[in-house]
Image (cartoon, rainbow, N blue to C red):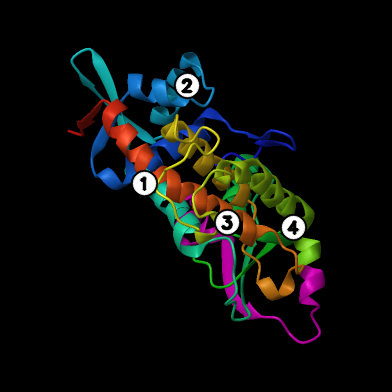
Amino acid sequence: MENDDVLDPAEGPQQRPQSLMLAFFGNHVLEEGDLCVSSGSVIDVLGRVGVGEPAVRSTLTRMVNRGLLSRQREGRRMYFGLTPHARRILEDGHARIWTRGAVDDAWDGTWTLLGFSLPDSWKSRRHDLRSRLTWSGFGPLYSGLWIAPGEVDVTAVVEELDLSDHVKVFRAQAADLTDIDQMIRDTWDLESIAARYTSFDARWTPHLASEPDAGSGSGSGSGSGSGSEDDPIGTRLRLVSEWLWTIRTDPRLPTRHLPPDWPAGPAQETFRRVAARTEEPARRMARELLDTARAR
């Protein structure tokens, strides 16, 4: 996930093509085993959310070079599938969205502390580590000491970056003299995190305006929903990509240490309702539109 996406308060996050590409493969390939999708199909779907063909082609090539996608030729067409590395990334995102969620009402008081010391010349690896720690729910308690609520397993992160000799991880609980509320405010930018949720909710609530039985929280794609019926595959791609962008910097802080009007819960409810009503229409559309092949 990129760290320099930009939030436009009026129009939402300006998603990079790679973020949208990962969301596309997460929506339509991750749970389909060894499925590959033709470049033409990827160009078609990402074009629906404003990504031009040159950007799609260059992103596909870049993701192959980074080990995120595999490719194979079938006649005159090129097909792309997920590598094991990409699957791990998408499975983690899937768990973050559907299993862990954005609200933590059951925090047990445990914190994970991670200390690291890297040579000054390792700027790129330091950036990668901080980026991965942010996605994993950590924030900088001090420059080389990061903290996350709950028990967070960072083994894969540390090993993939080959930093095992430079990182120390501990489980801890705060002593009584520690003001946890103040520590949270000092470590994380709560206003920025809350603004993402509020903006997401404002952008996507109109998609539920024509939803039957709007209070039920269910739906299978009936109703127009601000265009979701006309183009469910594009709507769902934007929805998932924007939600991942929204939660990327949220460490799922314990609810009892957050402001009473914390907007994560309402935003998550909106996300799940739009997701529920677009899921089956998007699947049907994908079956009709996507040119696929099995990986060799």
User: From mark 4 to mark 2, how far is it between C-alphas?
Assistant: 41 Å
Q: Is residue 121 highlighted in magenta?
A: no
Q: Label 1 to label 4, Cα distance in Å?
A: 31 Å
Residue type for callout 4: Ser
The residue indicated by pointer 4 is 143
**Residue 268 tag number:** 3
Query: What amino acid is labelled 1 in the image?
Result: Arg
| Residue 285, above or below 3 | above
Q: Where does residue 125 sit, x and y in percent of width and height?
A: 58, 44
Callout 1: 10 Å neighbours few (<14), some, many (20+)?
many
Q: Amino acid at mark 2?
A: Gly
Asked which quadrant contains residue 268, the reply is bottom right
Residue labelled with disc 1: 87
SS for callout 1: helix
Q: Nearer the viewer, mark 1 or mark 4?
A: 1
Residue marked by disc 2: 47
Q: Secondary structure at mark 2?
A: helix
The residue at the point 23 percent across, 20 percent down is 73
Q: CA distance from mark 3 to mark 4?
A: 31 Å
Residue 85 visible to the viewer: no
3D distance between C-alphas at marks 1 and 3: 24 Å
Q: Is residue 186 above or below residue 248?
A: below
Q: Are marks 1 and 4 in contact (CB under 8 Å)?
A: no
Q: Who comes first in sequence, dot 2 or dot 1? A: 2
Q: Which residues are magenta?
A: 154-183
Image quarter (top left, top right, bottom left or bottom right) of the N terminus: top right
Query: Horizontal placement of 41 versus 237: left or right?
Result: left
